[in-house]
Amino acid sequence: MGKKSNITHQCLKELNKQKKFGESKFEAKQAARKAGRNSATVRGIYSTVTFNSYVRVCKQFIAETIASHKEVKTFKDCKKYVPEFLQDKEDKGLSAWTLAQYGSALASAYNCRKNDFGYDYPVRHRANIKRCRGVNSSDYRSPEERWDTAKMVLKATGCRRTEALRLRMEDFREAPDGNLEVFKRGKGGIERWCLVNPKYVEELREYLKTAETHPVSGENRLFLKAQLPSGSIHDMRADYARDLYQYFEDRGDVATGKIYHCKGDMLGRSFDKGILSAVSYNLQHSRDNVVVNHYLWK
């Protein structure tokens, strides 16, 4: 076995120890909090998509480190060159978000935190987020587009792409207040009943009366990949978040009076923390700042 193959094997062996497929990261964090531990201490790779992404990063790191430092013999030897690798990627223009992902991938392989490498990650700013690549999500608003049904369901449910592809007829139910709820099976093992955007309840009810289903992985699902827009759908999740914030604000029963004050390019704007928590819950998130920075920018 050559040096590169040997080091890669050592790396993959460490990454495999982090696998927690089929487990819920959300439940693991809840258990940590109940035990009095910081939920940030919860480690592990809960998604095959994340695992494959981390493998690609680690292989790239190993190849470039071996090429630049012939003296390394083990994966452990490579660790001190992580800051150099990340700095090189920063110099080549990788975004702050991508650099953070690279750091997380290597931290998983070395069973440490991404900040333990001694590299100063660039600050992530909301205004620099690239939400759409290729086709702009605003294109899907055009009435002549063929995504009419899909975009209605997406704005009604606020689903991520993977969540939308898992939707079944039985994932919708009547709520006690006359609204609809949707059961989302999200990333990190988070599964919960969430509010359907009240603006689309009647339209969604009509759709469900005659909706066609497709057999996928032993389930009858509402959408195939080809039936969802091929570009970004983040814009429609932002619509869902904005509409829900207004709905909860008008309803008046979840506001706490505690205010979240925005910073950076959103300085001067503010949101009620109680409403943010309600919107965050229905988006399958757990942090108010994520909702503000990624969804309520509209």
Image: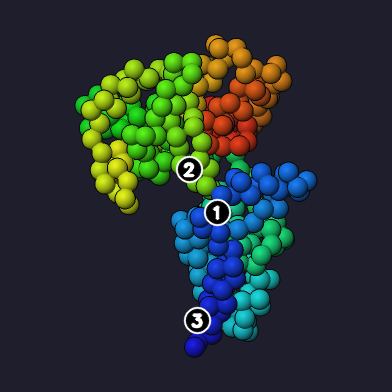
Residue picked out by circle 3: 5
User: Which residue appears at 35% of the width and 42% of the height?
Assistant: 165
Amino acid type indicated by mark 2: Gly
Reply above or below: 266 against 53.
Answer: above
Mark 3, residues whose alpha carbon is within 10 Å: few (<14), some, or many (≥20)? few
Mark 2, residues whose alpha carbon is within 10 Å: few (<14), some, or many (≥20)? some
Whole-percent x, y for residue 277 in the image: 61, 28
Residue picked out by circle 1: 23
Please state which of the two labelled residues, at mark 1 or mark 2, is closer to the viewer: 1
Cα–Cα span, label 3 and label 1:
30 Å
Q: Secondary structure at mark 2?
A: loop
Whole-percent x, y for residue 262 in the image: 65, 27
Q: Secondary structure at mark 3?
A: helix
User: Which residue appears at 55% of the width and 17% of the height?
Assistant: 248
Q: Secondary structure at mark 1?
A: loop
Residue picked out by circle 2: 186
